[in-house]
Amino acid sequence: MSGQEAISNESFGVNCRNIVQWAKLHIESGDIQGIIDPSLRDDYDIQSMWKIAEKALMCVQPHGHMRPSISEVLKEIQDAILIERAVTAAREDISDEMSRNSAHSSLNLCSLDLGGAENYLALDESIAQPTAR
C-alpha cells in the first residue's frame, strides 16, 4: 500500500468518526430531521426514522458488548419498513378519498349550477307573465 492510500484510508476513518459525532449530536438533541436527506422531502415517517437512527447509534458503540446483534438490527429495519408501508398505504387511501371527494364535489357543483339555471329561468318566466290586479 502506498503512503497516499494510507493517508486516504486514515482520513476516511477520521471523517467517519466526525460523521458519527455529527449525527449523534443531532439525534441526542432531538433534531432527527437535521440528518435526513432533504431530497426525501418529508416522504417518510418520522417514527421509522427514529427507530433506525437510535439503532444506528447503538451500532457505533465503542465496545462490542454494547452493540446490538445483527438480528436486532434487522428486526428494527423490518419494523421501520412496516411503519413506512403502513404510512404510505394510509397516505394513498387519503389521497384516493380526497380525489373521490373532489370529483364528487365537482359533480355537486355542476348539478348546483344546473339547478340554479333552472330556477333562474323559472324566475324569469314568472316575472315576464302579466298578472291581474
Image (tube, rainbow, N blue to C red):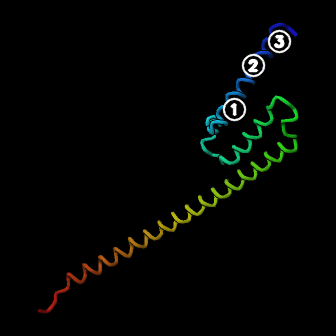
- Identity of the amino acid at label 2? Val
Vertically, is 28 above or below 91?
Answer: above
Marks 1 and 3: which is nearer the front?
Answer: 1
Q: Residue furthest left?
A: 133
Q: CA distance from mark 1 to mark 2?
A: 15 Å
Marks 3 and 2: which is nearer the front?
Answer: 2
Provide the residue designation for mark 3: 6
Q: Residue furthest top?
A: 3
Provide the residue designation for mark 2: 14
Q: Sequence-wise, which precedes: disc 1 or disc 3?
A: 3
Mark 3 touches mark 2? (CB < 8 Å) = no
Provide the residue designation for mark 1: 24
- Identity of the residue drawn at 70% across and 56% down: 86
- Identity of the amino acid at label 1? Lys
- Identity of the amino acid at label 3? Ala
Mark 1 touches mark 2? (CB < 8 Å) = no
Residue 16 rendering spot, x and y as whole percentages: 75, 24
